[in-house]
Image: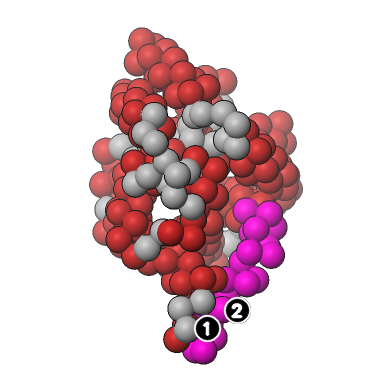
Amino acid sequence: MDLLHAVVLGVVQGLTEFLPVSSSGHLELVPRVFGWEQPAGSAGRAFDVALHFGTLCAVVGYFRHDLRRVVVAGLSPSAVRRRDQDARLGWLLVMSAIPAALAGVLLEGFIDERLGTPVVIGWSLVLFGVVLAVADRLLGVRRIESIGARDAAVIGVAQVLALNPGTSRSGVTMSAARALGIARDDAARFSFLMGIPVILGAFVFEMVGLASDGIPDGLGTAMIVGGVTAAVSGWCAVAGLLRFVRTRSFTPFVLYRIALGVIVLIVA
């Protein structure tokens, strides 16, 4: 793989993994736009491992202090018994990841064979852009501390829809959180935190295949470059969006999704 391709795809992965615009959809569209030949088979899995590792490093690095408190409290029996807020949040994050993890394993073949076409991506960008717009107009005043098991389950089920390229994991989980009355910045924060076990799961799942196939010759440098650029751009996306939504709505992302979706459908 050309190093320029690795840089571009790394930046695209890092930004779109956390902005509500769909990383999987963009990773399908960008190579088509530039006429790049995507690595297939073991090479494709290896490069996906690098990109997911980069975004995992970005979100874990940004929330490292929160994660330390959550993990320590969640593994402490005394903290769980007294319903410590950090312990409670940790187990809610685990609960929210279960639906997507099960669906990903059970529907892997269907997703690979039926989804990811330009038409599906185009309609998904438009449809879930409208969903984000509607949800974001609802009044939301609840803070992240008020999120309970029912909320985590609903948002977790919504996250299953993100297995379809074009939906956006962050977009659909933020939409679900906003529909439950959660404030915009807390919806974004919870979406990023609940993405950690999902991204980690995808990374581990892909690592199993990589361990058996090995790294294809000549791909090592591209994997490092793609992973580093995904980590840097991912960090910027998390920090930038959390700062942005404190004072602004998701409207710019909605308009971008709809415009891109319409263009994709016209071209397709």
Q: Residue at x 57, y 74 (%)?
A: 71
Q: Which of the pair 232/250 is nearer the observer?
A: 250
Q: Is residue 84 left or right of residue 107?
A: right
**Distance in Å between CA atoms under marks 2 and 1:** 9 Å
- Residue annotated with mark 2: 72
Q: Is residue 33 left or right of residue 135?
A: right
- Tell me what residue is drawn at x 34 percent, y 41 percent: 179
Could you tell me residue 230's position as x and y percent? 66, 44
- State whether the magenta stretch is mostly helix, strand or loop: helix
Read off the magenta span: 59-79
Residue in view at x 54 percent, y 67 percent: 211
Marks 1 and 2: in contact by CB < 8 Å? yes
Provide the secondary structure element on which disc 1 rests: helix
Mark 1 crowdedness (10 Å alpha carbons): few <14, some 14-19, many ≥20: some
Give the x, y percent position of residue 119: 31, 23
Residue 62 in the magenta stretch? The answer is yes
